[in-house]
Image: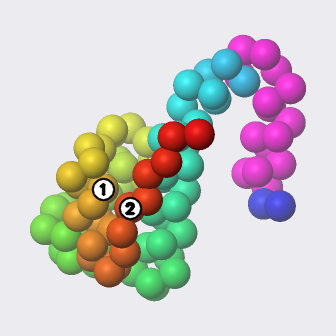
């Protein structure tokens, strides 16, 4: 378990934090997957940005959670890695 995961697990004991986390969990999960994918392909933010026709600043804002991306943009990123998005409501 990473230090970040340990920190989150500890903070989830706090009711206020848990409520906010639950509201943002999907966004954080997507961000985490995107970062892992970029790193697995050994790409910098700049390289990924060029690959999908955007700027490094946009990739940075996505990865730090300060911007919300749409499904079309998410699909564009997935296709850059020859991946598909799988969506499921549980």
Q: Is residue 58 visible?
A: no
Please provide the residue range marked out in magenta.
Answer: 3-17
Q: Residue at x 33, y 38 (%)?
A: 68
Residue density around tag 1, few if under 14, some if 14–19, many if 20 or more, within 10 Å: some
Farthest top residue? 16
Say if the magenta span includes residue 23: no
Q: Which mark is residue 51?
A: none
Depth order, front residue of 9/61: 9
User: For numbered disc 1, what is the local secondary structure?
Assistant: helix
Q: Is residue 10 above or below residue 61?
A: above
Q: Residue at x 71, y 22 (%)?
A: 17
Looking at the image, is mark 2 or mark 1 earlier in the sequence? 1
User: For numbered disc 2, what is the local secondary structure?
Assistant: loop
Instruction: Say whether residue 10 is left or right of residue 48.
Output: right
Task: Report x, y in % for residue 16.
Answer: 72, 15
Q: Tell me the residue that label 1 is attached to.
A: 74
Measure the alpha-carbon separation of dots 2 and 1: 8 Å
Q: Quadrant of residue 41?
A: bottom left
* CB contact under 8 Å: marks 2 and 1: yes
Majority secondary structure of magenta residues: helix
Q: Tell me the residue that label 2 is attached to.
A: 85
Depth order, front residue of 31/82: 82
């Amino acid at each position: 378990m990473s230090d970040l995961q340990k920190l989150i697990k500890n903070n989830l004991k706090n009711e206020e934090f848990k409520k906010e986390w639950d509201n943002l969990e999907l966004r954080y999960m997507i961000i985490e997957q995107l970062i892992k994918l970029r790193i697995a392909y050994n790409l910098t933010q700049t390289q990924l940005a060029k690959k999908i026709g955007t700027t490094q600043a946009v990739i940075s804002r996505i990865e730090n959670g300060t911007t919300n991306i749409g499904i079309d943009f998410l699909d564009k990123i997935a296709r850059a890695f020859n991946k598909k998005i799988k969506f499921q409501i549980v």
